[in-house]
Image: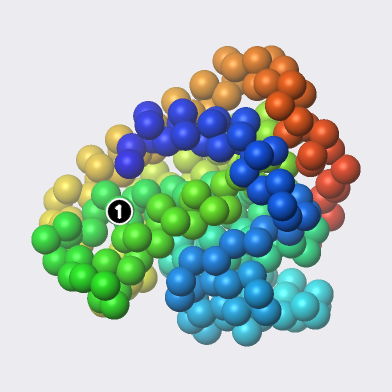
Amino acid sequence: MKYGRLAALTVTIALSASTAALASDPGRIDAYVTPYYNFSGPDVKVGKYSGGLASSNQATFVATILQMKQRWMQLTFAELYVGAIRLYDLGYRKEATYWFYTAQYKGRQFAMLADPTKLGSMGDPGFELYQAQNAFFEVVGPDINGYAFGDIDSVIAIIRRVQNENRTVSNLQSIYPAVAFVSKSRWASANAGLNAGLGKLASQLAGEKIELGQQRAQNGTQARFARLTSKRFPGGY
């Protein structure tokens, strides 16, 4: 999915958040994406940071997030999405927004550059990750965007930061060693299109800021998320 379509989907998710998760607490993301994350527990299976991400101990969790930020450009999109969920659940919601938009970018990048002829089938790493990138976006987006779009200017600033941090492509073959990718000669141009699309999303949000606010008020999204606050993450948002 390119960012032209994604821009519309992102806005739609934000506006429909009040109906997307009515049965749950807006301060918690009740999501599961097999086998990487299940909110019950929570159960986290994204590699070496899983235990720290799942921890309810604030010190352990914060230390894990700080460790992950030290190798920011080498994180998988699954690690980033789970980090976003847990940051949100533990009250670091502005930081969660930054992680979410980074995860969203990395997930779309993965989907564009993974070799579609070598994804395999159910149970194969490429296939499972390809399916997961879209699933994470759809189950995490309503809550994070539902909260974040209460401050459109902050979201736009985060999107611009994510855009600037991803002008080039990391070594995907190192990050996802079990996945086959298209020729590296195609990476730069594909990423340039993705990056430009993210810029268009930021411009769209800026141009529709008043309308978005009015729609949030009308459909109940603003009221649903208005009581939520955000703790400042050490060295972050």
The picture places residue 59, in percent across and down from the top left corner, at 80, 78
Tell me if residue 16 can be seen.
yes
Q: Percent x, y for residue 227?
A: 88, 43
Three-letter code for the amino acid on which mark 1 is drawn: Ala
- For image coordinates 17% across by 48% down, the residue present is 186
Q: Is residue 142 left or right of residue 95?
A: left
Q: How is the image coloured?
A: rainbow
Q: Quadrant of residue 198?
A: top left
> Is residue 235 in view from this perspective?
no
> 194 left or right of 217?
left
Residue 188 relative to residue 204: left or right: left
Q: Which residue is mark 1?
A: 111
Q: Position of residue 201 (x, y in %)?
A: 48, 29
Judge by depth and name the residue closer to the eye, 139 or 196: 139
Q: State the image coordinates of residue 149 (x, y, percent, origin top left).
A: 68, 34
Q: What residue do we see at 49% from left, 51% from top?
A: 137
